[in-house]
Image: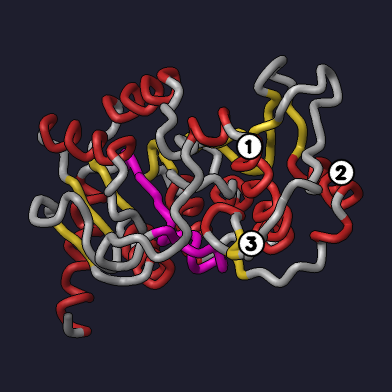
């Protein structure tokens, strides 16, 4: 796409948003890759990382839980150091300027909140907390990290590469000696407060998102391929309602061919260019 064409599309997107504000934003991994957190999928929507842990496997298999926490222990220090990108900050500024009605994020990194956004729904949960599967006690992930490292000093220095959602690409063979800290209240098993693949988004979150969509005038997808139905459903609902559906995403999405405008740019560049076009029109 030429520089002129990009500028023209940005102008059209800004005009449409000014005419129909109250944005309902869906954000995906493309916003956080610019903060150093990898995405599960490439620009064609194909897997480019380890197959994620399945919900039922985590619940039923101690070995799966051990492999998850070994990789998470290695990935957490990198993940927890991530900071908001220019895209996160631009979305916060759009909220402050009165354009953003509500933001539904697939990401579990809380970087929108770190950037200052307030009207955010963590659709798939948050990685900075864990919850006991027996008594529902919640613990901060950073405190759990301390216990993981104290109980498993031989695993702390393993070489690893950061994967999506705080995971790490790490080779581990026999994991029988790895110790998972138990719940401090009931000795039950902890699980990150996120929706694993094969799990269900809590109905209350979905209901909240639909209620906010009813109050919105335009839907904007930022950095998501929409391959996960949990977010794609809102695009379908917006289209059925007759709302403009816009996108900023490099690569293929599940809604391609149906957007009023789609910008094939990285999120920070596009949002940083879009923001002044909105505020100039106020």
Q: Which residue is mark 3?
A: 83
Residue lying at 84% horizontally and 19% vertically, measured from the top left: 185
Using a 10 Å C-alpha cutoff, classify the residue at mark 3 as few (fewer than 14 neighbours), some (14 to 19) or many (20 or more): some
Whole-number angstrom distance, CA of label 3 to CA of label 1: 20 Å
Tell me which residue sits at (22%, 75%) in the image: 7
Left or right of 32, for residue 281? left
Estimate the spatial distance between the alpha carbons at disc 2 and disc 1, rounded to whole Å.
15 Å
Q: Is residue 213 visible?
A: yes
Question: Front-most of 135 and 33?
Answer: 135
The answer to whether marks 3 and 1 mark residues whose Cβ atoms lie closer than 8 Å is: no
* Label 1 CA crowd tier, 10 Å (few <14, some 14–19, many 20+): many
Quick one: 234 or 180, which is closer to the camera? 180
| Residue position marked by numbered label 1 in the rendering | 192
| Identity of the residue drawn at 80% across and 26% down | 183
Position of the N terminus, as image quadrant, is: bottom left
Residue 162 position, x and y percent, is: 60, 65
Q: Which residue is mark 2?
A: 147
Q: Secondary structure at mark 2?
A: helix
């Amino acid at each position: 796409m030429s520089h002129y064409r990009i500028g023209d599309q940005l102008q059209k997107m800004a005009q449409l948003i000014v005419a129909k504000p109250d944005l309902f934003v869906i954000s995906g991994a493309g916003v956080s890759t610019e903060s150093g957190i990898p995405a599960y999928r490439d620009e064609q929507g194909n897997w480019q990382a380890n197959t994620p842990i399945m919900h039922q496997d985590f619940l039923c298999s101690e070995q799966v839980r051990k492999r998850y926490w070994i990789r998470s222990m290695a990935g957490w220090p990198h993940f927890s150091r991530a900071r908001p990108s220019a895209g996160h900050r631009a979305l916060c500024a759009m909220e402050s300027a009165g354009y953003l009605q509500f933001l539904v994020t697939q990401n579990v990194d809380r970087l929108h909140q770190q950037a200052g956004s307030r009207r955010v729904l963590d659709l798939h949960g948050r990685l900075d907390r864990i919850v006991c599967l027996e008594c529902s006690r919640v613990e901060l992930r950073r405190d759990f990290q301390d216990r993981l490292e104290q109980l498993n000093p031989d695993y702390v220095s393993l070489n690893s590469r950061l994967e999506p959602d705080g995971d790490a690409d790490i080779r581990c063979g026999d994991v029988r000696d790895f110790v998972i800290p138990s719940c401090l209240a009931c000795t039950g098993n902890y699980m990150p407060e996120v929706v694993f693949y094969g799990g269900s988004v809590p109905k209350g979150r979905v209901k909240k998102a639909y209620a906010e969509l009813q109050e919105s005038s335009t839907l904007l997808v930022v950095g998501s391929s929409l391959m996960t139905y949990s977010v794609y459903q809102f695009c379908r609902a917006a289209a059925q309602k007759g709302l403009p559906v816009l996108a900023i995403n490099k690569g293929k999405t599940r809604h391609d061919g149906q957007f009023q405008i789609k910008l094939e740019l990285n999120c920070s560049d596009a949002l940083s260019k879009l923001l002044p076009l909105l505020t100039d029109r106020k």
